[in-house]
Amino acid sequence: MTKILIPLEKSIGERRVSATPETVKKLNALGCEIFIEKSAGELSGFNDFSYEQNGGEIFNFNDNDVWKKADIVFCINCPDKENLIKLKEGALVIGLMNPFGNKKLIEILSVQKLSAIALELLPRISRAQSCDVLSSQANIAGYKSVLLAASELDRYFPMLMTAAGTVQPAKVVILGGGVAGLQAVATAKRLGAMVFVSDIRPAVKEQVESLGAKFIDLPEISEKPLESGGYAKAVSSEFLKEQREILSRHLSEADVAICTAQVLGKKAPILINENMLEKMRPGSVVVDLAVSQGGNCVNTKPNETIIRNGVKLIGAPDLPTSVPYHASSLFSKNLISLISPFFKEGIFELIKDDEIIQGCLISDKGAILQEKVFEIGVRN
Ligand code: NAD
């Protein structure tokens, strides 16, 4: 029987878990034995008993034998070295491995002869949509970013007509109209704001308009292709300069800016610089979801709120973990979709020339497969 280990996530502030009682039941039906570290689901709203009721077995953090016998480890974030070295040769770790430029990871995987799937590298093909944790988690981040902005803003979001006078709707500018950005648009619209979006992929214009928001025109400099494999490409500094000029006008009238613009494996583009911040209204709020990649706004710091000339700058790298129940439910369902096709009559066998696996398998029993990702932070 394939033995799957579900660890208690150890990263600071992490509240998600990589399997829920519902997905443990599904793994059982596939013919797996599932070992869940004590209290692993507690912060997501799943207690140990609910895992046991669905066929899981609870183990204590000091039970090294479970790590030694595991065939597969499901995780949100890559487990620490202390636990990885307990795994047997050929064990498969699946999660957000943070592989970009991560030379320490390459060393552990190759020395310990481990296999690993980095979910960040799932190819953007239709068949991979149901496995795509970046999308399921970005959706949550987009939703929560708007709620956070609304609760920090010094004014209402919707237009209100009251006996004391009329309140104008808030103006929200969203930078990046991918999964997080589009969910931020939908959430801000539901709260009654006027919403404007900037993205460099022209396809986003139609999606934004279908949600009732306005697309901010792109600079006229022609720069093509702006997209490859479903990902935006980094644009030139001349393009960014012109883009910032266009954005500056919008931001000077904005109440809220939500920053979601990213380029896979690269630093996020700076879309709000010091000059632009100076023109923003005191009391306005910037929520920067791209802060872990350097941020779209200057001066934002992960998990910090900084006030600059009265503008609140919120660095929000981990919003999915603030909705742990649904973040865990969706993440764990993504994992089931990813591995289910590789079970035949209870036996797990990874098909390495499968298009999805080819894209995201970073190590095969210690043989490193995506060296460029580890070395210089880009795809092979
Ligand atoms: P992302 O997180 O990589 O980037 C966020 C957004 O930032 C993107 O829309 C990108 O175009 C934008 N951006 C980059 N540089 C910018 C700049 N200078 N100014 C403004 N915006 C900038 O992207 P994402 O949200 O994960 O998804 C992007 C697209 O890929 C979406 O259309 C999504 O539906 C699609 N997607 C497809 C699959 C699949 O088919 N399996 C999976 C995931 C995403």
Image: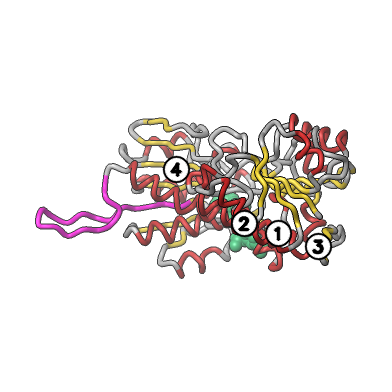
Find out whether the residues at labels 1 and 2 contact each other: C-beta distance under 8 Å: yes
Residue at point 67% right, 40% down?
59
When the figure is inspected, residue 296 is found, relative to residue 121, above or below; the finding is: above
Q: Is mark 4 within 8 Å of ligand 1?
A: no
Binning the other alpha carbons within 10 Å of mark 2 as few (below 14), some (14 to 19) or many (20 upward) gives some
Q: Report whether 112 appears left or right of 7.
A: right
C-alpha gap between disc 3 and disc 2: 17 Å
Q: Residues within 10 Å of mark 4 (few under 14, many from 20)?
A: many
The residue at which mark 4 appears reads as 287
At a point 80% along the width and 53% down the height, the residue shown is 2
Of marks 3 and 2, which one's residue comes earlier in the chain? 2
Residue 168 painted magenta? yes
The residue that mark 1 highlights is: 28
- Local SS, label 2: loop
Specify which label sits upstream in the sequence, 1 or 2.
Answer: 1
Q: Which is nearer the N-term, disc 3 or disc 4? A: 4
Q: Residue at x 39, y 31 (%)?
A: 308
Q: How far is the residue under mark 3 from the one under mark 4?
A: 46 Å
Badge 3 is on which residue? 346
The residue type indicated by label 1 comes to Asn
Q: Which residues are magenta?
A: 155-174
Whether 210 is among the magenta residues is no
Quadrant in the rendering for residue 30: bottom right
* Amino acid of disc 2: Asn
What amino acid is found at the position of numbered circle 4 in the picture?
Val
Q: Residues within 10 Å of mark 3 (few under 14, many from 20)?
A: some
Could you give the CA–CA distance between mark 4 and mark 1, rounded to whole angstroms?
41 Å
Element on which disc 3 rests: loop
